[in-house]
Image (cartoon, rainbow, N blue to C red):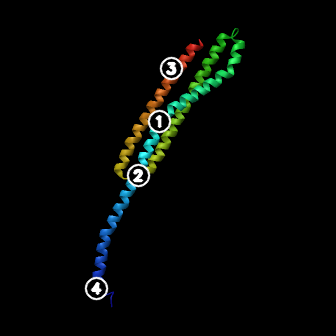
Amino acid sequence: MYFGSVKFFKHLIVTVFIALLVLPTVFAIVASVKSAENTRRIETMEATINTFGETLPDKLTAAVRKIVDDTLKVEKSALKSELNSQVEGLNQQIEEKINGLYESTVEQLDELYWNLNYYIDLQTASISEQTSASMNTKLQEFKEALQASISLQIDELRQQLNMNSNGQTADGD
């Protein structure tokens, strides 16, 4: 009878001892593989964010220029016919439209800023679930630095838009 014998309990003890050695080792290997995958994901996200940060100002400037150019093309013929009789009125309309474009661009930038923050929050939450507590603190620091960088870039874009708005207002006068 094997189940009640000393040999059975000896095999049971050896099996439990081996399981106590093998299971933590397997879990440690799995955890290190997941940690390496998360590190690669973070590096990929950092590269994407850096690329996005580098191309965002150029795309916004081009979009603003396109909007301004389209508006000016539409009104060029009207400006030519009414220039002699309504110079002051047209200057005021151009200024209002530039302010409107500026305000809509600011709104778009704010919306983009909040969308980026929302996207960053979603990505941070997803990564936080997959990483350890120390990785969570590093991600929080990265998030704050990224938000500060984005805020600085948005502030710089607003300053450029203010300068462009002031320059175009001065040109229109």
The crowding category of the residue bearing disc 2, from other C-alpha atoms within 10 Å (few below 14, some 14 to 19, many at least 20), is some
Residue that carries the numbered disc 3 in the rendered image:
163
Q: Residue at x 52, y 30 (%)?
A: 58
Q: Quadrant of the N terminus?
A: bottom left
Q: Which amino acid, by three-letter code, is at mark 3?
A: Met
Question: Where is residue 69 shown, x and y percent of the image?
Answer: 62, 24
Q: Which amino acid, by three-letter code, is at mark 2?
A: Asn
Residue 38 numbered mark, or none:
2
Question: Do labels 4 and 2 touch, CB within 8 Å?
Answer: no
Question: Do labels 3 and 1 touch, CB within 8 Å?
Answer: no
| Image position of 113 with respect to 93: above or below | below
Residue that carries the numbered disc 4 in the rendered image:
7
Residue 164 numbered mark, or none:
none
Foreground disc of the pair 2, 3:
2
Q: Residue at x 36, y 45 (%)?
A: 138
Question: Where is residue 135 shown, x and y percent of the image?
Answer: 36, 49
Q: Quadrant of residue 19?
A: bottom left
Question: Do labels 4 and 1 touch, CB within 8 Å?
Answer: no
Q: Quadrant of residue 81?
A: top right
Q: Residue at x 47, y 38 (%)?
A: 51
Q: Earlier in the sequence, mark 4 or mark 3?
A: 4
Spatial CA distance of label 4 from label 1 is 68 Å
Spatial CA distance of label 4 from label 3 is 88 Å
Residue that carries the numbered disc 1 in the rendered image:
53
Query: Secondary structure beneath disc 1?
Result: helix
User: Would residue 40 appear left or right of 60 to someone viewing this image?
Assistant: left
Spatial CA distance of label 4 from label 2 is 46 Å
Foreground disc of the pair 3, 1:
1
